[in-house]
Amino acid sequence: MTDPIAGYRPFPGVRDEMMEGGEVRPLWRGFARHLAGLSPDERAQRFARGDQYLRDAGVFFRQYDGAGSDERDWPLSHVPVLVDEGEWDALAAGLAQRADLLEAVMADLYGPARLVTEGHIPASLIAQSPEWLRPMVGVPPRGGHHLHLLAFDVGRGADGGWWVLGDRTQAPSGAGFALENRVATARTFSDFYAEAHVHRLAGFFRSFRGALEGNAAILTPGPLTDTYYEHAYIARYLGLMLLQGEDLAVSGGRLMVRTVSGLKPITTLWRRMDGAWADPLELEAGSRLGTPGMVEALRKGSFTMVNALGSGVLETRALMAFLPRIAKALGQDLILPNVRTWWFGEGRPAEQMVISPALSTRQPFDDPPVTGGDPMMLAGQEPVRLSTTPAFIDGALVPRPMSLRVFLVRTPDGWRTMPGGFARIGRTADTAAIAMQKGGAAADVWVMSAGRVAADTMMPLGAPYVRTMPPVLPTRAADNLFWLGRYVERAEGTMRLLRAWNVRLAEMGDRRAPLLAAMDPLLAGLAPEQGIPGGLIAPSLRAAGQLRDRLSPDGWSALTDLDRTMRSLSQKVAPGDDAARALSTLLRKLTGFSGLVQENMYRFTGWRFLELGRFHERAAGMASVLAVLADPSAPEGALDLAIEVGDSVMAHRARTPVTRRESVIDLLALDGANPRAVMFQLDGIREQVALLPEAERMDPLRRAVLRAHTRLATEVPEALDSAALWDLRDRIWSLSDLLAEGYLR
């Protein structure tokens, strides 16, 4: 067995977190022994277990390049960073002081502006910042505080002291990823973690959730942002609505969310986008992400913004140069120093500059300390050599540069620090390679106690259990749930048609056979002779991607696995028997996803819209199948084909040994006990529509559903000719427009 610790060699002159003077530091000895006791195969299996958890949970980051962006697997560095509890407490105290200082600066910049008028901050430094939002001047925050959730990037120098590398005040990212890093790393080293005295993270999030007043929500720019997974994950974890700008409206000076039950007030909005994009009326006019009138709603004090609009100005890298003097003006010295910061503004001579590798505001994760100037803000940066921590790179344990992101939340008792955080680990020895866009990785941070730590959960301590209902359903979420139901059902129906087509192609060997030609209207837009279409699940994925906060990890994993399988098979499956067997595999995977949703999704309003989409699409699809294949002019075998596509072969045989048009119409159109019949779908639509909000009103949707249901219920098989079936299909389609008119706009 090879001991990876024995071959570990820190860089000369650079502090290493694990080793000092050729010896493992006391804090790391237990973990080092555990790591040394694992064989290479066992270690690889454990790392794979952590990676598999992240894949199953759908954790990803968005990789950007010149061609656009792509979702990539989350780059976990499996070895955690260990920090002593006492050292962490000292770090937390310094950051809490800094948080109070930034709050004071924010309150002054958007209030009396004494720091500028008294010469503590150059006016041009603030005026030139794109994050300085003039419309917010003189707007006091509801509750009295501008800053509620902060993050600080910190690094350790050669002397062992911590330095602040950057302040994250705009919309700090990474807290959700810290949770996922913790779960994955704990699974990787499950036996050691269970006995180690590692502080848990749940209490931090419990405090944060408790500090969010009333009807709270997260405002996200949407699925294309690089941290969207985290937005969805945190929304699920904390039980918050995940909203986009279009979900909100301002009415009577109040911020409201558009729901299927009408406009509902928002009390607290946790903003996860840059402030300038929040309101196209008063801020960035070209924004399609924000909500018109949001600034006015803040002026009226109708809701709390986390963090306040304009807080991005505190991330201006050159501002760090002035924080020490501001602290002194307020009667204190900074506990945690900045890395030295220089600013070239207002003709100051170079020898008066103080330089800092503060982090850029534009990239949430990839802002490593680097060398160079900031032309716009006239700020310089001093090269920094960060401490190193162990990481497995290409199978070997090697030292790599590290920085930490530490999170603080405001509570009624003051700032609370997450006991752990989010570490960024360099892929190479170069500090600049710490960026995830350049191959860097993320690691968990374990705050180690000398004694046992108490178990912690999201449940408030000592609070009695009270059942709470799911939050109101935004119209955009309802729309995506409805279309997800439709798209999944449409994909299943198409797969069944394609499988039947390929089975008969294998039997007949002729694409021009009458029965195959008869299916052309049902396969419009597809080329079945080319095999399996690779993008059949793409619409379902797009709708599901908008619902990451509402779909279980298993459901999302099942859908993405189906998409990967379909795309892979589309490249190598030939038409005929080969494609038919592959489509059977895909159908099993798709029904697995549908089963997960059907069995596991809570029966609240959102589930009703999903069911309505499924019922709607299956009803319209079956009416189309019958109109084509049960037409008297259809070729021989068309009725049996309709029964097969309707997945009702056994049910039909149990009812009658002879296939007749009347028996097929009765089973697939009129039989309310058959889950594939049109009547069964209309029963479901009628039931779910009756349970939607304001069900007592006999609005156009409910009247149309009742008419369609009553008309079909009074039909006999002989009367349902193809014209009547096409008319039925059209009436079913019209229900979608009425649903959208009543609930989705």
Image (tube, rainbow, N blue to C red):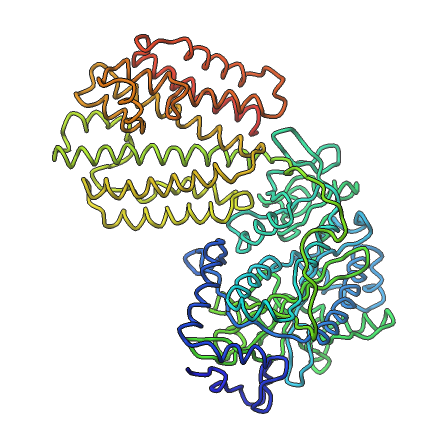
Pinpoint residue 247: horizontal percent, then vertical percent.
Answer: 61, 38
- 442 is higher (above) or lower (below) than 670: below
Quarter of the figure that contains the C terminus? top right
Q: How many marks do you count on the picture? A: 0
For residue 464, what is the image quadrant?
top right
Q: Is residue 385 visible?
A: no
- 683 is higher (above) or lower (below) than 340: above
Quarter of the figure that contains the N terminus? bottom left
Pinpoint residue 196: horizontal percent, then vertical percent.
Answer: 62, 71
Which one is in front, 569 or 157?
569
Which residue is rendered at x = 72% and y = 41% of the image?
466
- 642 is higher (above) or lower (below) than 128: above
Residue reaching furthest to the bottom: 21
Which one is in front, 381 or 348?
381
Residue reaching furthest to the right: 331
600 relative position to 127: left or right: left
Residue reaching furthest to the front: 654
686 relative position to 497: left or right: right
Q: Is residue 395 visible?
A: yes
183 relative position to 472: left or right: left
130 relative position to 22: left or right: right
- 25 is higher (above) or lower (below) than 627: below
Which residue is rendered at x = 82% and y = 55% of the image?
111
Pinpoint residue 414: horizontal percent, then vertical percent.
Answer: 80, 60
Which one is in front, 371 or 580?
580
Pinpoint residue 605: horizontal percent, then vertical percent.
Answer: 58, 32
